[in-house]
Amino acid sequence: MTAGHWRRKSDLLKEAGMAQVEQLELDANRDQLAADVRGLVEKYRTIFAWDVPEVDLALTDRLILAAIRQALDGIEMTSSGPSSR
């Protein structure tokens, strides 16, 4: 095997290791992430309630969640993509 082959394999192993570290970090913060998203839903539910006196909370939640998903899709599309380590 060539030196280039080992270098590429080494890079792949480093990336896999970092992905594991990043996954562990995400796992450690998953509850906070969920709480933050719940907080966003609550924030915008409150805004809807101020603007619409007889607001349908189930519909409001569906609309807010759809908007959050759309925002996430936009963020994902404009993210830098794969790491260039």
Image (cartoon, helix red, strand yellow):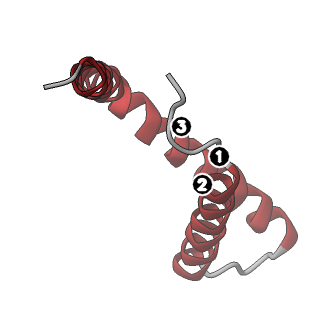
Q: CA distance from mark 3 to mark 1?
A: 20 Å
Nearest to the eye among marks 3 and 1: give it. Answer: 1
Kindly give the residue lying farthest to the left in the view shown.
Answer: 1
Q: Residue at x 83, y 63 (%)?
A: 50
Query: Callout 1: few (<14), some (14-19), or many (20+) C-alpha neighbours within 10 Å?
Result: few
On the image, the x and y values in percent for residue 69 come to 57, 65
Left or right: 41, with 12 as reference point: right
Judge by depth and name the residue closer to the eye, 43 or 25: 25
Please, what is the three-letter code of the amino acid marked with disc 2? Glu
Q: Residue at x 42, y 29 (%)?
A: 32
1 and 2 marks in contact (CB < 8 Å): yes
Q: Residue at x 81, y 76 (%)?
A: 52
Please, what is the three-letter code of the amino acid marked with disc 1? Ser
Q: Which residue is mark 1?
A: 79
Judge by depth and name the residue closer to the eye, 24 or 83: 83
Of pointers 3 and 1, the one earlier in the residue sequence = 3
Query: Which structural element holds mark 1?
Result: loop
On the image, the x and y values in percent for residue 29 come to 37, 24
Left or right: 53, with 35 as reference point: right
Compared to 40, does 66 lie above or below? below
Left or right: 74, with 20 as reference point: right
Q: CA distance from mark 2 to mark 3?
A: 18 Å
Q: CA distance from mark 1 to mark 2?
A: 5 Å
Q: Which residue is mark 3?
A: 36
Query: Callout 2: few (<14), some (14-19), or many (20+) C-alpha neighbours within 10 Å?
Result: few
Judge by depth and name the residue closer to the eye, 60 or 2: 2
| Residue 5, numbered circle | none
The quadrant in which residue 26 appears is: top left
Q: Residue at x 54, y 29 (%)?
A: 84
Nearest to the eye among marks 2 and 3: give it. Answer: 2
Of pointers 2 and 3, the one earlier in the residue sequence = 3
